[in-house]
Amino acid sequence: MIPSRVEETLPELAPFVHAVQARRPGDGTWCEAWTVRDVLIHQAGNAEELARVLQAFLDGAPVETRGFDREAPYRRISDSDLWSAFLDRCERLSETAAAAAQDLSPDTEVRWTGRTVKAPFFAEHMREELILHRWDLTGDDRTAVRCLTEPRMTEHSVVSVGAPLLARGRAGLDLGPEGRVEGRLRTPGADDVVVSADADGGSIRLAPAEGPAAIESDAAVRVLLLWGRRPADPSRWHSDAGPEALRRVRALLGGY
């Protein structure tokens, strides 16, 4: 039973919980190297760290974000204890986010992973994580597609976490001093997502649609591509960019 105050802050928690409960901990997922248990470990670590950083800011003693080694303690506990820990961390994050909404302006900037984000980011990011990693469990079911299609999923992916999403892919490209990758991800009726990378860094932004697109797709697929995922049905995306340009853009979209 998820407390109502938690569901109000994290409405995507219940569908994620149901997806986990319908599977065994060792079952595979669409996230290539992760089982269901691994996804749950990751989510427990996410909820804990989001709450820890935001609570420290509220307490007037800001802390830096820890890396994914924060997940290590969860790997050493039983499946039942992991489940309890995950729900507890989500409840704690909900309480912290509610306190922040009451005490802080929405424009308050808080340090997170080496950059600053606005205070509402912490609950919003967990909501996105719940949607994305539910897709890792279920694939393209109706709930996943509906949630991934929401405009806020694209906006959050681009504006709030876009630069980190490109970091892994850019590191794997041999760009050299003169090399550059740029492409537009297009969804009809919406702004393009423009991604680029060169020897000096990478960028991602929303921009009005113009010129040729590297990849055209529905909104849900575009979010998956930004996070380094692939839809089960490849006919949901289309490209006339040519194999070399397409390979480089898709390599840049390495995700987490």
Image (cartoon, grey):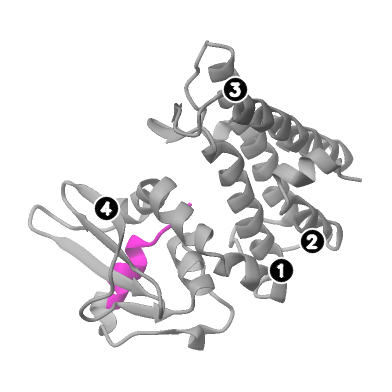
Residue occupied by mark 3:
103
Measure the C-alpha gap from mark 1 to mark 4: 31 Å
Q: Secondary structure at mark 3?
A: helix
Q: Residues within 10 Å of mark 4 (few under 14, many from 20)?
A: some
Residue occupied by mark 2:
19
Q: Nearer the viewer, mark 3 or mark 1?
A: 3
Name the residue type under label 2: Ala
Q: Is residue 97 magenta?
A: no
Relative image position of residue 136 (x, y in whole percent): 64, 63
Residue occupied by mark 1:
138
Relative image position of residue 242 (x, y in whole percent): 25, 85
Q: Nearer the viewer, mark 2 or mark 3?
A: 3
Q: In the image shown, does 129 or 73 lie closer to the viewer?
A: 129
Residue occupied by mark 4:
203
Whether residues under marks 3 and 1 lie with C-beta atoms below 8 angstroms apart, the answer is no
Relative image position of residue 245 (x, y in whole percent): 24, 76
Q: Residues within 10 Å of mark 1 (few under 14, many from 20)?
A: some
Of the image marks 4 and 2, the number of the one nearer the N terminus: 2
Name the residue type under label 1: Thr
Measure the C-alpha gap from mark 2 to mark 3: 34 Å
The magenta stretch is: 246-256
Relative image position of residue 221 (x, y in whole percent): 50, 73
Measure the C-alpha gap from mark 4 to mark 3: 33 Å
Residue 156, relative to residue 222: is it above or below? above
Whether residues under marks 1 and 2 lie with C-beta atoms below 8 angstroms apart, the answer is yes
Q: In the image shown, does 139 or 90 lie closer to the viewer?
A: 90
Name the residue type under label 3: Asp
Q: Nearer the viewer, mark 1 or mark 4?
A: 4
The picture quadrant where one finds residue 190 is: bottom left
